[in-house]
Image (spheres, helix red, strand yellow):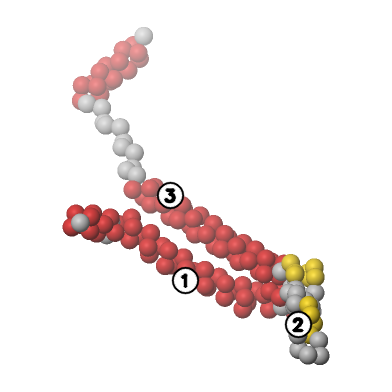
Amino acid sequence: MKQFFEDFKAFALKGNVMDMAVGVIIGGAFGKIVSSVVGDVIMPPLNLLLSGAQTGSLKWVLRDAVAAQVDEAGNEIAPAVEEIALNYGAFIQNCIDFIIIAFIIFLMIKGIAKLTSLRKKAEEPAPEEPAAPSNEEVLLTEIRDLLKDKK
């Protein structure tokens, strides 16, 4: 049993698990920020364009709610029927949330890729200049050139 807890401790404290935990926490906070941007900044002007209707409450009613029917003695004759509706307003709001999150993640990945490529360029060693010819090569080149001139 002691070995089990030691193995679990080693697993839980690995760098990848801790990084993932931090990512999940930051992702949750980021989701709240995006939801606030959509709900508090983007949707009010959109609701204004929709003549004051709240986007989240937009729905298409398939069947209206019916109240329970009760006779004079208080006995229930017919039970209440709940409303059946397609809540497309919530769907629209969730789609806008998704588009904003996807766009921001796209920008982040694009920025990280750019920084990575800049770092790789900075880390690449400059191409080495060819070594200067040795004294023997220089002398042989001069002799060759002199022989060409005599022909």
Give residue 142's position: percent from left, percent from top: 28, 20
User: Disc 1 designates what residue?
Assistant: 29
Q: Are marks 3 and 1 in contact (CB under 8 Å)?
A: no
Label 3 sits on residue: 117
Do labels 2 and 3 touch, CB within 8 Å?
no
Asked whether, in this view, residue 43 is left or right of residue 146, the answer is: right
Q: Which mark is residue 109?
A: none
Vertically, is 71 above or below 22? below
**Three-letter amino acid code at disc 1?**
Ala
Kindly report which numbered mark, 3 or 1, lies closer to the viewer in this rendering. Answer: 1
| Along the viewing direction, whichever of 124 and 48 lies nearer the viewer | 48
Which residue appears at 43% of the width and 67% of the height? Answer: 26
- Element type at mark 1: helix
Query: Along the polypeptide, which appears first: circle 3 or circle 1?
Result: 1
Q: CA distance from mark 2 to mark 3?
A: 73 Å
Which corner quadrant of the image does residue 61 belong to? bottom right
**Which x, y percent locates residue 111?**
48, 57
- Say above or below: 142 vs 111: above
The 10 Å Cα crowd at callout 1, few under 14, some 14 to 19, many 20 or more, is few
Q: Amino acid at mark 3?
A: Ser
Q: Which residue is mark 2?
A: 76
Q: Which quadrant of the view contains residue 88?
A: bottom right
